[in-house]
Amino acid sequence: MKKNGFTLVEIIISIVILSFVSAIILKLFISADGINKRAKDKSFAGIYCSNAIESHKSDDLSTDVTHRYYYNRDWLEIDDAAQAHYSIVLKMTPSEHNKNLIDFIAEARDKDGAIILRHELTTLNRHGEVFVW
């Protein structure tokens, strides 16, 4: 007797195998999307933390100062802290070791308060004493 097609059992087995392979591939795509989002957030956080530090490097500083910046889901700056999806907190303090230095700490946080990125820098207080190197 000649066989002209697949049996029902063969079709069911092939569908099950295809379903498992498809589920694994779908899980990889979902995982890659999450990794891509975290990488994008870290990239924007690094840029905006650096921008915040650069914009205040020339400030005259004798006491602790804190600046806050708020951003929406697309990393566009907004004024409303309640609507913010991300925030940058820039803390500037005179250095404990040398009064002519400023310690900058910029932290990017998500809406839940989790730190995305922390950027630290110590630089010369440009309004302090003049140094000749």
Image (cartoon, grey):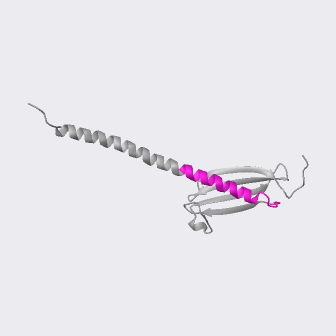
Q: Residue furthest top?
A: 1
Identify the residue at image location x=17%, y=40%. Answer: 8
Residue 60 lies in the magenta-colored region: yes
Q: Measured from the top left, where is residue 130 in percent x and y?
A: 90, 54
The vertical placement of 126 against 11, above or below, is below
Residue 105 lies in the magenta-colored region: no
Identify the residue at image location x=69%, y=57%. Answer: 51
Main SS, magenta residues: helix
Q: Measured from the top left, where is residue 48 in percent x and y?
A: 65, 56
Q: Quadrant of the N terminus?
A: top left
State which region is magenta.
38-63
Q: Measured from the top left, where is residue 125 in percent x and y?
A: 83, 55
Task: Give left or right: position of 4 versus 95.
Answer: left
Q: Measured from the top left, where is residue 94 in percent x and y?
A: 80, 55
Task: Give left or right: position of 15 versus 129.
Answer: left
Task: Name the one closer to the observer, 81 or 52.
Answer: 52
Identify the residue at image location x=34%, y=40%. Answer: 21
Task: Give left or right: position of 12 versus 49.
Answer: left
Q: Quadrant of residue 112?
A: bottom right
Task: Give left or right: position of 77 versus 14.
Answer: right
Q: Quadrant of residue 20?
A: top left
Task: Name the one closer to the observer, 6 or 94.
Answer: 6
